[in-house]
Amino acid sequence: SAVISQKPSRDICQRGTSLTIQCQVDSQVTMMFWYRQQPGQSLTLIATANQGSEATYESGFVIDKFPISRPNLTFSTLTVSNMSPEDSSIYLCSVRQNEAFFGQGTRLTVV
Amino acid sequence: AQSVTQPDIHITVSEGASLELRCNYSYGATPYLFWYVQSPGQGLQLLLKYFSGDTLVQGIKGFEAEFKRSQSSFNLRKPSVHWSDAAEYFCAVGAGDSNYQLIWGAGTKLIIKP
């Protein structure tokens, strides 16, 4: 199993600012997945982060808005840039080792 | 296209009653199937998974699920629900290769009547 430490757990941010979310995994993994979960909704994949290459973004998500870093096999960051209230959501990082493991999530409120 | 359908947005059952949550999938390869639960304000917890073998799988908290290939279904069941089972339940399907994401259903919210 994998244990993922994600931080911050929550934040309230002003519109127009940026927030960087960090995820640390206790084992080396090739791929890390970043999701957004809006209230009462399912998980929406933002991007897949592979160490040593640029992240692969899903339709509707762009690198300028959600830049991702993946400096090594145990760590990744997601930045939510130039935030607006529509970005208020829970952001989750995840890895798979057959099943999916998740960080505890970052609850972001943009005011 | 790959997809997971959970046709019930919410389900209300009485405490002590039996439960079945439906999940249908469309997947081009041999599916790995999962059920996760998310309690209010909590993270996602794996209830059970199916990779191969016996099509009836047992999970935590008294849950079980049955894989029916002919129906492309993986329904979750519990013989007697408890108030603490009130939560959102997500079905997911994926490849055996962990480098690929899971495909998630929209979720079913379970409401327990006292």
Image: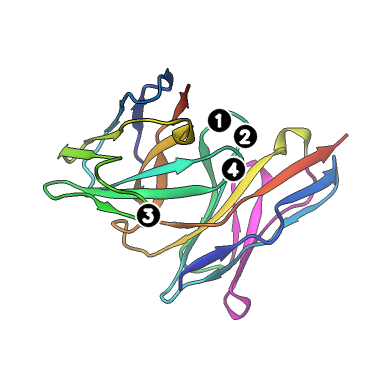
Whether label 2 touches label 1, CB < 8 Å: yes
Q: Foreground: B42 or A44?
A: A44
Q: Amino acid at mark 4?
A: Val
Residue at the image point whose x is 78% and y is 43% from the top? B81
- Distance between the alpha carbons at the discs numbered 2 and 3: 23 Å
Q: Amino acid at mark 2?
A: Ser
Queried whether the magenta region covers residue B105, the answer comes back as no
Q: What residue type is disc 3 on?
A: Asn
User: Does residue B65 appear left or right of residue A70 in this picture?
Assistant: right
Q: Quadrant of residue B68?
A: bottom right
The answer to which of B24 and A39 lies nearer the viewer is A39
Q: Are marks 1 and 4 on the same chain?
A: yes
Q: Is residue B37 left or right of residue A67?
A: right
Residue A74 horizontal side relative to residue B94, left or right: left
Q: Position of residue B66 (x, y in %)?
A: 63, 65
**Mark 2 highlights which residue?**
B39
**Residue B87 in picture, x, y percent from top left:** 67, 39
Q: Residues within 10 Å of mark 3 (few under 14, many from 20)?
A: some
Q: Which structural element holds mark 1?
A: loop
What residue range appears in magenta? B55-81
Q: Nearer the viewer, mark 2 or mark 3?
A: 2
- Callout 4 secondary element: strand
Label 2 – label 1 distance at C-alpha: 5 Å
- Residue farthest along the bottom direction in this orientation: B70
Q: Which residue is mark 3?
A: A98
> Percent from the top left, x then y, of residue A68?
23, 40
